[in-house]
Image: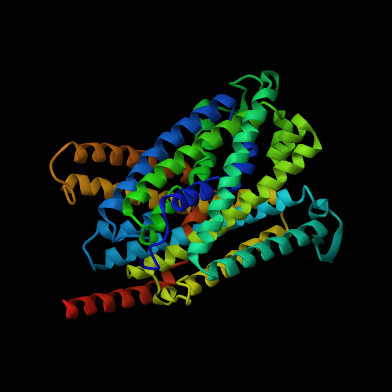
Amino acid sequence: MDQQRKLGIWVLTALVVGNMVGSGIFMLPRSLAEAASPIGVMFAWLLTGAGVLMTALVFGNLAIRKPDLGGGPQIYAKELFPKGSNLSILSGFMSSWGYWVGNFAGNVAIITTFASYLSTFFPMLTSSKTVLEIGPFALKLGNLLTFLVCTALLWGMHIIILRGVEGAGKLNFVATAAKVLGFFLFIVIALFAFDKAVIGPLDAPRYDGNGQPIGLLGQINNAALSTLWAFVGVESAMVFASRARKQADVKQATIAGLLIALAIYIGISFLVMGVLPQNKLIQSEKPLVDAIIAIVGPAGGYVLAGLGLISLLGSTLGWILLSAEVPYQAAKQGMFLPVFLKENRKGAPSFSLTLSNALAQLFIFSTISHSMATAFDFVIYIATLAYLVPYLIASVFQLKLTLTGETYAAGRERLADGIVAALATLYSVWVVIAGTADMKTFLLGVALLASGVIFYPQVKKAAQQANEKQKLSA
C-alpha cells in the first residue's frame, strides 16, 4: 500500500472530532455566556449546526467528485477561474495563505488552553508575582511559566509528527477516544446537578460596551461567531484526503465527526450555564473544571482537568498536523511556495511543519503580557475569519459543479447536491458578513491576507513552470 494512503475512517473521524472538540469545548461556555442569553445561545447553536452540516456535506461531496484537489477547502479557489490564469493562481495562493495563517494562529488558542488547565495542578502558572520590570512592562511569574509550557508543548508535538504522520494520527485517535468518553460522562453528571435557578431567565438581557441592551438577533450574531470557532476543523478529514485509504471514508468521517462534536458542544455549553452563575462563568479561565468542582468537589476538578489535558494534547497534535499539511498540499497543486514540498524520510512535510511552528511561536509571545483567556479571545479574532472565506469558496465551487453538470449525470443527485451547496453558500455569506461587521476583525482579516502578497511572484513563477512541464510531457 502507498505510504501516503494509510489513514482509515476511524483515524479520519478522530481527526475531525479531535480538531473540532479542542480549545472551544473548554473556553466557549464562558464566551457564550457573555455574548448571549440562553435562548440566544440555543438559536446560535441550531443555526451554526445546520449551516456547518451543509458545509460538511459539501466537503464530503467534493472529496469524492474532485479527489485530485486535496488539501483543504481553500484549494478550490483556483478552480473558480480558467486553469493556469493569473486569477486562478492568485486566488488559490491567497486563500491558501489565509487558511494556513489561521491554522497556526488557531494552534495557539489550543496550546494556551492547555496551560490554563495545567494550572489546576500547578497554581504557580497563574502567579501574579513580578519577576522582571522594564519601564511600564512588568513580567509576571505566571505569564513566564505559561510561555515556557506552551513553547515546550509546541515543539514536543513537532518532534512526534516528524516521526511520521500515520503514527501521529493514531496517537490523536487514542486521545480523542478518551476525551469523547470523558465528556459524555461529564454531561451525565451535570444533568443531575443542573439548576434552572442558576441559568436564570432564558431571555436574560445582554448589554454592549456602552450599556445598551443587545437584541436577540444581535446576540445570535455575536454567539454564532463564537460557535463557529467550535466547528472549525470539520474539514480536517478533507485536508488529509490524499492520505485516506478510500475517498468515501472522507465524507463519512466528516459527517460522523460533526454529529459527535455537535452533541458534545450543545450538551456541555448549556449544562455549564446551569451549574455556574453567569458572573462566575464569565470570569472563569477553566469553566468546565470550575463546574465539576461545584458539583462533586475538588477531586472531580482534578479528574476533569486531567481529561482536559489529554484532550488538548490530542487537539494540539491534530491541529499542528493540519497546519503543516495545508501549505504542503497547496504546493502540490502549484498554489504555494515550492519549498513547502520538502519531506523527511517518514513522509512528513518537514519544512512546512517547522515554519508553521516557528510562526506559531511568535503568537505564543502574547501569553507574556496577557491572561490565558485574553490570549484565547485575541487569537479567535485572528483565526476565525481565515476559515470563513475558504468555507465560502468550497460552497460556491460545489454550486458551480451542480450548475454546469460537471462530474454529474442528470438525476436527483445533482439537484440534491445543488440545494445543499446553495444553503451552504447562503450560510457562509451570512457568517462572513457577521464576522466582518466588527472593524477590528475585518482589519485583522485584511492584514492577514495582505501579508502574503509579497510571496505571490514566486508562487506565480513556480505555477507557470509546472504548467509548462505538463504541456511538454503531454
What residue is rendered at 76% in x and 35% in y?
Answer: 293
The quadrant holding residue 329 is bottom left
The colour scheme of the drawn protein is rainbow
Q: Is 114 placed above or below 222 here?
A: below
Front residue of 400 and 265: 265
Left or right, 473 with reference to 293? left
Q: Which quadrant, please, contains the N terminus?
A: bottom left
Q: Position of residue 468 (x, y in %)?
A: 22, 78
The quadrant holding residue 336 is bottom left
What residue is rendered at 22% in x and 65% in y?
Answer: 83
Q: Position of residue 148 (x, y in %)?
A: 73, 64
Q: Position of residue 296 (x, y in %)?
A: 77, 31
Inspect this view and state whether residue 208 appears.
no
Q: Position of residue 301 (x, y in %)?
A: 75, 40
What residue is rendered at 64% in x and 43% in y?
Answer: 26
Q: Which quadrant, please, contains the C terminus?
A: bottom left
The quadrant holding residue 185 is top right
Q: Is 98 placed above or below 292 here?
A: below
Inspect this view and state whether residue 276 appears.
yes
Left or right, 317 with reference to 345? right
